[in-house]
Image (cartoon, rainbow, N blue to C red):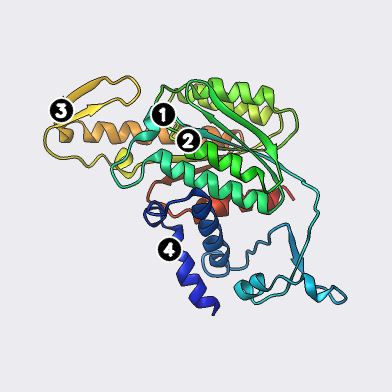
Amino acid sequence: MLTRQRSIYAKYLNPEVVSRLGKLDLIARLVVEGFIIGLHKSPYHGFSVEFAEHRQYMPGDELKYIDWKAYGRSERYYVKEFEEETNLKCYILLDISASMGYTSRKLTKLQYGVYLAAALAYLMIHQQDAVGLVTFDQKIRSYLPPRAVRSYLKQILLVLHRARASRKTKIGDTFHEMAERIKRRGLVIVISDLFDDPEAILSGLKHFRHNKHEVIVFHVLDPQERRFRFGGEVIFEDLETRQQISTQPEHIAREYRQEMEQFLQTIRHGCLDQQTDYVLLETSTPYDKALFEYLVKRKKLG
């Protein structure tokens, strides 16, 4: 029974499968359910997660509070908990600048980021952590402060549903502004392609760390942005400035890849130096990688 459920839900960790689903709340639920069931098999052997509204059954608990759906998924008895104190505030910062609209596949970086943010928000609220959402480009476009009530998820999903990639980027400025806004120590999750000045980005991330926040950076790229496998005569257009150049990619491919690798190393090493968790994701990467990184960080925070 459990093996069959794993195979059914595993497909919802595939970004291209998810992109064919309609409603964002359905996407978030199926991704998270597929992820949780998948935790019981490699490569996550030995790591488990329980929603905060559940705890394992103990002798003396009333049978009417057993969650039989949870038993069907895990073959373990859980009791529903109705009131738990929130013990963590999470802030999801989603980049909606024009460069996030790029795709060489079926899924843009922004769509990938939206689905990832929705799944993270769903998971956090079901663990009764407070989650908030910030969308930004050259400035903050929307800000929902962290809350832990389930009805709040609808507001988060509505903002995500309306997100459009359309303007230039100023990532560093956004990070500094948010670091000043957030007063209580919490967890900051960044979802972005980070196409901006690396020094400004790292300075903004350092501001979060200086204020004692924990930070996870999900660096989202399209596979073509890393590998640059174009052929023939191609016109490249900057999605933020609309500047165009016409060239034969093979003439610049080697230098491009070197520049891209240097960019990635600068960001990666900068995050490492300031103890910021850095996770590189391509839009073909299953969502379980990102969700698992969040749970690892969440576990460390106690």
Which comes sooner in the sequence, label 4 or label 3?
4
Mark 4 → mark 1, Cα distance in angstroms: 30 Å
Image position, residue 144 (x, y; %): 63, 33
Which comes sooner in the sequence, label 1 or label 2?
2
Q: Is residue 256 left or right of residue 144?
A: left
Mark 4 → mark 3, Cα distance in angstroms: 39 Å
Image position, residue 213 (x, y; %): 68, 34
**In the foreground, 131 or 183:** 131
Of the two numbered discs 4 and 3 in the rendering, the one whose residue sits closer to the viewer: 4
Q: Residues within 10 Å of mark 1 (few under 14, many from 20)?
A: some
Q: Which residue is mark 4?
A: 11
Which comes sooner in the sequence, label 2 or label 3?
2
> What residue appears at the point 42 percent right and 32 percent down from the top-left corner?
164
Locate residue 62: give its quadrant.
Answer: bottom right
Q: Which residue is mark 1?
A: 195
How many numbered discs? Answer: 4
**In the foreground, 122 or 246:** 122
Q: Which residue is mark 3?
A: 247
> What residue appears at the point 35 percent right and 45 percent down from the top-left corner?
107
Q: Secondary structure at mark 2?
A: helix
Q: Is residue 13 left or right of residue 101?
A: right
Mark 2 and mark 3 in contact? Answer it, CB < 8 Å. no
> What residue appears at the point 73 percent right and 43 percent down from the top-left corner?
88
Amino acid type assigned to the residue bearing label 2 in the image: Arg
Q: Which residue is mark 2?
A: 162
